[in-house]
Image (spheres, grey):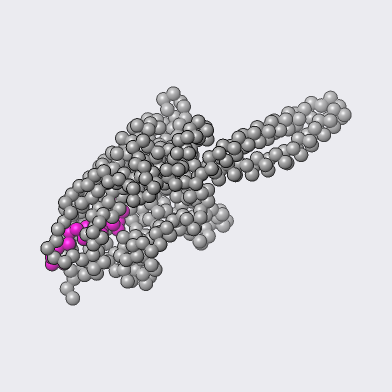
Amino acid sequence: MLDIKFIRENKEKIADAAVKKNIDLDLKQLLAVDKERLSLLQEVEQLLALKNDLNEMIKSAANDVERKEIIEKGKEIKTKLEIKEPQYKKIKEEFEDLMVKVPNIISADTPIGKSDEDNVEIERNGEIPKFDFEIKDHIQLGKDLDILDLEKGTKVAGFRGYYMKNEGASLMMALMMYAMNKLIEKGYSPMIPPTLVKGAALFGTGYFKGKEYDSEVDEVYEVASGDKEADGKSSKEKKFLVGTAEPSLLAYYSDEVLKEEQLPIKIVGYSQCYRSEIGSYGKDTKGFYRVHEFMKVEQVVLMAADEEESIKMHDAMLEISKEVHEELGLPYRVLKICTGDLSAGKFRAYDIEAWMPSRDSFGETGSASNFLDWQARRLNVKYADKNGEKKHVYMLNNTVLPSPRPFIAILENFQQSDGSVLIPEVLRKYMPGNIGKIIPKTK
């Protein structure tokens, strides 16, 4: 969410961002509603002030006649408030509905484009492997190595369900441990946040398209069962499962005023993640490239409101992801996300993709995003600068490693002619017995 004052002063920038992000926004309507909102707010505040003055005047009235006149005047004000307050409430709701649609501005170096097809490859690293034998995809490898069971996963969990088994389970946990320790070494504080959260955390970070959860467009699971408060009463709060640790990590500081010397705050979080994938119906239906449940290590940064420094931080976060892929030995490329593929709240973004032989293409394994203060305004996270002025922090996030796709890339890139799969060197210390290879099970 942006500051309305900023919107008023930067109408052309906002309109341009909406067009380039393919967002339907009636900016003229928003500004007209804002003007009416301010006018009604002023009227309501004046009436309330008069009401308070009259209450004091009643106490000091010289006689009953004067008191009666004041009471009659108070009734007039009450009648006016009964009209104006609902009008203000209605226009305020309309204003808020429009405000949540306002996109963030776009960085000067973001490519112009209409969709993900216009994202720009800016870097490619690593040698794509050449095989002198017929390769298998991760589905067949998982079955032959007895480390992945999609059939039982579907039976128990439904479409996109899976079981990770034996060395596969160890390898997946090794990826998570490697990523967590990597970021701790980089100065990030580790955290395991809740994955069951209130809607405010998801709205605040932009995971709801509007003010409230919409099951038709938001790729989020709502928990249907009721909950109890500490006093035993039924909770009226709706609860949701997060699709990444980002909402929980950033909401940790909601409604707080930090000190500038605390910044930047760097956190690495591990969490289970849940995504309904409703927007991906019919895509990647085989294997576990696109699943409803997985693990992920996520990094977030809260920093001072400096656009130039935020771009430097954003690039530094991407460098960590590149380093991770290089240490895992995975060929990868980096995409700069174009305007048409940039979500409403993002100022600037990158994707990183690893080579997946069975797809004969790269597949997304991470995304780094810079939101400036768009999320912080929704979450109400501020800091006091050296002069005591309160400002909203800037918020950035990056996927260090999700569990499924790097796992796919490792299986397929490091498969051997005998059906075995080599384990990247950096992961072996996290494997039982420090094993360096997963071999097919004897039948």
Horizontal side of 371 relative to 29 (left or right) equals: left
**For residue 221, above or below residue 247:** below
Q: Quadrant of the C terminus?
A: bottom left
Rendered residue at 51%/44% (across/down): 25
Residue occupying the far bottom of the picture: 443
Horizontal side of 438 relative to 339 (left or right) equals: left
How many numbered badges does the structure rendering display? 0
Q: Which residues are magenta?
A: 399-419
* Residue 5, position as x, y percentages in the image: 52, 32
Question: Was residue 405 drawn as part of the magenta stretch in this picture?
Answer: yes
Question: Was residue 409 drawn as part of the magenta stretch in this picture?
Answer: yes
Rendered residue at 51%/49% (across/down): 210
Rendered residue at 26%/43% (across/down): 122
- For the question of whether residue 388 can be seen, the reply is yes
**For residue 265, above or below residue 66:** below
Q: In terms of depth relative to the viewer, which is nearer, 441 or 84?
A: 84
- For the question of whether residue 183 can be seen, the reply is no
Residue occupying the far right of the picture: 65
* Residue 370, position as x, y percentages in the image: 37, 40
Rendered residue at 47%/46% (across/down): 23
Q: In terms of depth relative to the viewer, which is nearer, 298 or 433?
A: 298
* Residue 90, position as x, y percentages in the image: 64, 44
* Residue 211, position as x, y percentages in the image: 53, 48
Horizontal side of 374 relative to 270 (left or right) equals: right
